[in-house]
Amino acid sequence: MSCAASRRMVGLIYSLIWSSCLLFSLGDDDFKREFLQMQAQLAILQQRVDSLEVENRRLQEEESEDRTPGIIPSDSTRPYTDIEDLQIAQDHAWIILCGALVFLMQLGFAFIEAGCCRAKNVQNILLKNLSDVCVGVLTFWVIGYALAYGGPYNESGIKTNRFIGTEHFLGLDFVEKHADGQIEPSYSALAWFFQSAFCAAASTIVSGGVAERMNYPAYLVFSIALCGFIYPMVVSWTWGYGFLADMNAVGYMDFAGSGIVHMTGGIGALVGAILAGPRLGRWEHPEEYVPHSLPFVVFGTFILWFGWYGFNCGSTLELHTAAKGFMAAQVAMNTTLAAATGALTVFGIRYILSRGKYDIGGLCNGILAGLVSITAGCGNVECGSAVLIAIIGGMLYQAASMLLLKLAVDDPIDAFAVHGVCGAWGTLAAAFFDEGAGMNSYHGWSGFACVHGEDGNCLKDANSQAILANLCEVIVILVWSGFWTAALFLPFKYMGWLRAIDDVQLKGFDQTKHHLPKAYVHDTQRDKVEIRQQEADEQRRAAEAEEREKAKKKKFVPIKR
């Protein structure tokens, strides 16, 4: 019998007894003796109810302390208490909602990438975005989640080998099956859904950096590798409680993934863009490579901003306590301030550089730069620090974007400048701008309290340890993501399978590779004139390319008129 039911029974007995008070005053001695005995038994029953309540609270506290971070199994078949029912339902509703918002970000990426590129490649770009989601979640289910969050874990909640998970492949053991046929659920299905959305986002970042010239089969192989191995291993060392989580007294701090998600994808985009080479004619005819639909870019930016609240706020991973509610609110405020600040920073810089011209594309990428920069520290920095982090992030984005142009690296949507550079900056900023007071008061993962030492006081020299840990995170991600991206793309490059041939790039992927020859079926008269002019230009460039090839074979280059 539950404590609540026992209390109801005691209340009923009390009402029956006091309703007999009138009879007691008029009854004989035998009735009085029976009444007194009943009252004594009632007092014993009340004591037993009180002791059961104390024991129930003790068991709840022990269970909360024993739960392993990451995967939280339900290890008994006892009925849940009323409080547990409410807490579990509330946590699941919160994380499913936030996971859906992160999933919605794929639509934002699709809008931005399609809008930034030329109309003749829109279908191919959307194909890659859709494939990232479909292939990504399946790969993460088969192997990725197991590598990232699979145990075993030790008593401290750290992976026993501190490197890689070896459990839960194909979702096995997400539920516990008992001998009597009963099934005990766990938090694993919820964790898989939320984290799979993050995994797909990391893959989609790369697609923007290699847009309009990489062949679909080569990209698909890379997407599978990133979702099944490259990204899960980074998660295993961080959110999966691997070696970066306990490398010193405080470990790394990356609340929602500036480094884990964005930098991993951004580095992949940079390496992919370098190996795939620039789009045909990108530097000879730069005027032809402007975004074909700025409305798409703006729509996509707003969708990403909206989805980012699920990305950052959902990284509280629960919402059944006051502390987590306060934390989610702080994260939402920092996220909003950083997005607005980054936007105005980049917009202002480009206004000055262009001598009074408005750049709406720069405004949109400034929003993303601010969001990426605050993602790691949104839970442990104050609102003023969030603004400063976004200002620096916007400046770093603009500098990286200009540097890539100077180096002739063709990144159509500035994927590396936004996600790679700002991701690295955001990871370091989470340690630099921690809201703790002074070098001996570091908060990190502890929320609104400082990390405590063995003496019960704030851990001394904690800030320097946090900076070291986050610096190690940045270096590890840089080396890991860069190495495996190159290892996957280089064989395709040397076999000639990585980059589309010139004819495909001239005509467009939509016309040469897709069932429908173009994404937009309605052409105005002006569109037709522009299309004819574009076709003439493409034929001219094709003839020039053919002439150059012939000249190379003759071992001389004619003087260009």
Image (cartoon, helix red, strand yellow):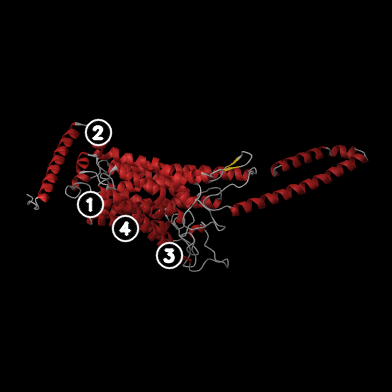
Q: Which mark is residue 531?
A: none
Disc 1, disc 3: CB below 8 Å? no
* Helix, strand or loop at mark 1: loop
Residue 517: assigned label: 2
Q: Residues within 10 Å of mark 3 (few under 14, many from 20)?
A: some
- Amino acid at the residue labelled 3: Leu
Above or below for 476 versus 173: below
Instruction: Work out whether mark 3 precedes mark 2 in sequence or the reverse, and give the earlier one.
Output: 3
Q: CA distance from mark 4 to mark 3?
A: 21 Å
First reached walking from the N terminus: tag 2 or tag 1: 1
Q: Which residue is mark 4?
A: 396
Q: In the figure, is residue 498 to the left or right of 467?
A: left
> Of discs 4 and 1, which sits in the foreground?
4
Q: Is residue 189 left or right of residue 5?
A: left
Give the number of the mark in front: 3 or 2.
2
Residue at mark 1: 356
Secondary structure of the residue carrying tag 2 is loop
Residue position for label 3: 468
**Of marks 2 and 4, which one's residue comes earlier in the chain?**
4
Label 3, label 2: how many angstroms apart (C-alpha)?
53 Å
